[in-house]
Every structure is written in structure tokens, then in C-alpha cells.
Image (spheres, rainbow, N blue to C red):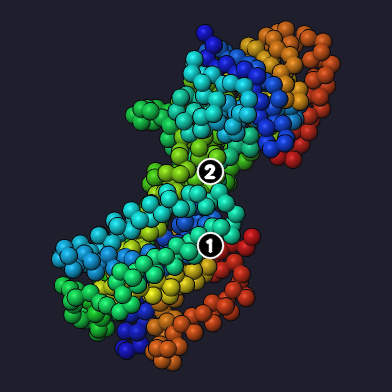
Amino acid sequence: MDTLNVQNLEVRYGDLVGVADVSLKVEMGKVVALLGSNGAGKTTTLNAIAGLVPASGGSIEWRGESITRQPAYAIVRKGLALSPEGWRLFVSQTVEQNLRLGATALADKSRMSHLFERVYECFPRLAERRHQRSGTLSGGERQMLAMGRALMSEPKLLLLDEPSLGLAPAVVETMYETLHGLHKQGLTLLLAEQSIQLALDIADYAYVLQTGRTVLEGTAADLENNEQVQRIYLGVGAAEEAVTTSPAA
Amino acid sequence: MLLLQVIVGGLLLGAIYALFSSGLTLIWGMMNFINFAHGEFVMLGMYVALLTVTYLGGGPVLFSLSAAVTLYGIGIIIYLTLIRHVMKGPMLAQILSTFGLALLLRYAAFWIFSANVVSLPQTTLSGIVDVGGILMPMSQLVAGVVAIVLTVGLHLLLTRTNIGSRLLAVAEDRNAAMLMGIRPDRMQALAWGLAAGSAGIAGALMAISYPFSPSVGETFGLTAFVAVTLGGFGSVPGALYAGLIIGLIQALSAYWLGAIYKDIVVYAMFAALLWLRPQGLMGKAS
């Protein structure tokens, strides 16, 4: 059964079109990747699903119910959590406070201590720094905290915006191992990623976006051997990977 | 010994300044919004205390709580009916709306209560206490101490509780807070309730010792702006220190120069300080 079903999504910012026509499906228990270069519309798509930006056209259905124009605070309560672009941490608050804020949408508060344990188990670095202000964390730790914070609402579907962006290669590897582990525990993932190789290693299925439209889709194995992807995106992906690992972020 | 008495008296009044200024700084910190009607909230707190004593009787505990609860409600109503809507408009609309609200509240008070100066009847807090040789009116001592406790309490509420953490989350990043499942409008309504409530109870505490009329709100509003600017916009501890400093400067200049000079000295020092440190005493340079 489809759990998330996005049909012909369109998002406009005034006269600018963020997303022109994106359709995708995420089935329960799967890992789905959104691929595409910078500006292809990956972030806008995830933000629209999470309710941060309103869709100007198309529909978003979650487990048979339309969530198209619902606000973000209502959507997270339905079991979709987003780890957003740029992490968006509450930098004046501690690691633990950030995680506790992540649990605001949690229906059953008695699960809280269990969730804290699970997040600290996944990211031991966060446990070490639990009383530190999140503004003092390194880039890798911030990424961990953003993911951990999203996990605190015990989502059924975790939306991840560029989990590898700005991280050192060794940290990226650990991050993807952790994602793999979470998936093994039954978490469904939809992740946007510029680095095609990373995404296809973990994903079951992937969609390729180009200038706000879904232009290709297929299983990870199909896309890995697809000449068009090879030609257009792997080149771009490799070049941008070099950029993202530079000290820019 | 008289000088010491003046200093303590100034600090006790300053503590009340700190209490209502912390409400103003909370609103600024939460939503970058300047509330010109904040002094009128203090004035309303005084009249709520008077009405409570007149019609319900009871002592300072009852009328202070009554002022706090009533103004908390008024703060939330004002947020829901006015502020929430003008927030969507341009900055000028926001400024003028609370300026208009201040005039509305002030002249409504003139209309209902007349311009006469009134004071609360003698309460159980009448009398003078001797604290180690310093003679203090009981009412000022109790009011000052309660004000400090409440200001520190507000700070602890913001920094040590879940609800405070959510308030600060909305202040820091509204969209990210929404991703957590927090409804920003509810948190902002709560902030307005807390801000008006702290102003209301500060008014009640001052009404115990000082006579008042509908025009006092103007002075308190200005005092709050000075305290918020000195303390750094958005900082409750900053407002606490600044409130105490203003109370102290007023008391000392009244003692050395005469009562009519106390405001001149405060505002002159304020202007000089802004010239030297535009970011305020404790604010960070931007």
C-alpha cells in the first residue's frame, strides 16, 4: 500500500516556480531517494510535503488522507518528520532541549525516555554533548542533532534533506551507516541527495528531478545502470561532491 | 544611613520596573514587535487592584493575583484580536497599532475612572520595618522582593521549562518550531499573556505604595523602553539589571538633586550611554 503519494505537485514563490510537476510514491518500509542537482526542486518538494511551503497545485496524500495544505505542526503529528535543509537547530538551546522539542508532537509522552535512549545510542556524540548549546556543535554533530530531533517524534516516515551536505567524508559514511541501521529497524525514509552514489547505495527506489520536474524514476539498480543518469547526473554529482566536501559549509 | 536607605528604596522600586520591563522585552524577543501600550498594561493593573479592593475586599495577595490574571487575559485577547493581524502588515502599521491601543486604553481609563489621582486604602502591609537600621515601608519592601522573585521566575520559566523552551524555539525559528509540532500563534498568545500579566501585577505592587491616575502608563512605558534598551532587547536578566539600575539612579538623583531632577538624570544618562554603546549595556553589537 502506498503510504505517501505526491501527484503533480506545484509550488510557486510569487512568480518563481520552485517545483513545476513532481509526482512520487513512498511505500512503507522502503528507502526512496530524490536525486538531482542543486536547484532541481528537491528541498522545495520535501518542504511542501512537510507543510513548510504551501503547494499551489497537485496533491499530497498520506495514508489515504490529503495533507496538501495542512500546516507543518499538524503534519508532524501524523507521523512525518523532516530534518530540514540547513538543519534549522535552535542554537541558543542545548542538545537535550532540541531533542525534547523534537518530541513535542509525540502522542505518547511515556515513550520519551526510550526515544532519548535510542537517539543517544545512534549518535553517542550527542549524548556526550547533551548539555552543550547546539550552536557550539560541529557540522557533523549538527546534522546528527537535526536527524535525532526528527526521530524524537517517532515518525513513520523520515524526510531527510541532504544528510551528507557539508560533512567530511568519514562523517558521511557513519551517517549513512546509521540511516541503514534505522531502516533495518523499520523506518521509512525519503531522502534528497545530490550525491547519486550515496543515495543509490541505500535506496530501494529513486526519482530524478530536473528543473522542478520528475524526469526519471526506477529502482536503484535500474538507475545505477541507466545511461542517461550516468551521463547527465553522475558527472554533475561527482563535481558537486567535490564542492560539498570543501570547507564551504 | 540615610543614603543606604535611599539606595535600598531605589532598588526596591527598580525591582518593579524590572518586572514590567521583562514583559516588554519578552514580546520583543519573541516576535520583534514593539508594544507601545505596555505602560498602559501597568496602569490597568493598578485600576484592577483598586476595583478588586473596592468591590471584593481582600488584601494585597488577592488584588495582585486579580491584576495578574485579568491582564494575562487582556494580553491574550489583544494578541488574538489586534496583534496577530497587524503582524502581517508593514512595520509602520505595527507601531501605530500599539500606539493607538495605548491611547485607547489611556483615554478609556480617563473616561471610566476620571483623571483624579487615587490610591489604594491602607492594607495589611502598612507600617515601617527596621531592617538592620534601615527604615523601610513594609509595602515597598514586600513589593520589591515579590517583583524580583517574579522576574527571576519568568527567566527560569523561559530557560528551564518545556513551555519556555517552546516559546524560545518560536522566537528563534518560527518554521523550525512548526516542524516540531509547535503552534507559533499559541506560543505568541502565551507570550502576550505573560507580558501583560507581569505588567499587571507590577502595577498592583506599585499601587500599594504610590498614588496613581490614568496618565501614569506613559511614564512607565518610557521607563520600560529605557530598561529594555539598556538590558539588551529580548533579555530578561538584562531587563532585571537595567530596572534595578534605573530605580537606583532615580533615587540617588532625587536625594542629591531634588525629586524633579530624577527623570532628567535617567534620560540624560540613557542618551549618553546610547551614544557610546548603541547596542545597549548588555546587548550584543549586531
Q: Which residue is drawn at 70% across and 40% down?
A: A249
For label 1, the crowd category at 10 Å Cα-Cα, with few meaning under 14, some 14 to 19 and many 20 or more, is: some
* Outermost residue toward the bottom in this view: B257
Chain containing the residue with disc 1: B
User: Secondary structure beneath disc 2?
Assistant: helix
Three-letter code, disc 2? Arg
Evaluate whether residue A162 shows in this view.
no
Asked if residue B106 lies left or right of residue A220, the reply is: left
User: In terms of image quadrants, where is residue B186?
Assistant: top left
Q: Quarter-wise, where is residue A6 in the image?
A: top right
Q: Left of B105 or right of it: where is A221?
A: right
Q: Is residue A27 above or below residue B153?
A: above
Counting from the top left corner in percent of width and height, residue A155 is at 48, 24
Q: Categorize mark 2 by other alpha carbons within 10 Å: few (<14), some (14-19), many (20+).
A: some
Circle nearer the N terminus (1, 2): 1
Q: Do the residues labelled 1 and 2 touch (CB within 8 Å)?
A: no
Does residue B110 sit above or below A112 in this rendering?
A: below
| Whole-percent x, y for residue B233 in the image | 52, 62
Q: Residue at x 52, y 69 (%)?
A: B230
Residue B226: % across, % down: 50, 71
Label annotation for residue A120: none
The label shown at residue B174 is 2
Extreme residue toward the front, this view: B111
Q: Mark 2 lies on which chain?
A: B
Quarter location, residue B283 = bottom right
* Camera-nearest residue between A26 and B145: A26
**Identity, as a three-letter code, of the amino acid under mark 1:** Leu
Residue B266, placed above or below residue A137:
below
Mark 1 = which residue?
A: B96
Closer-to-camera residue (A131/B128): B128
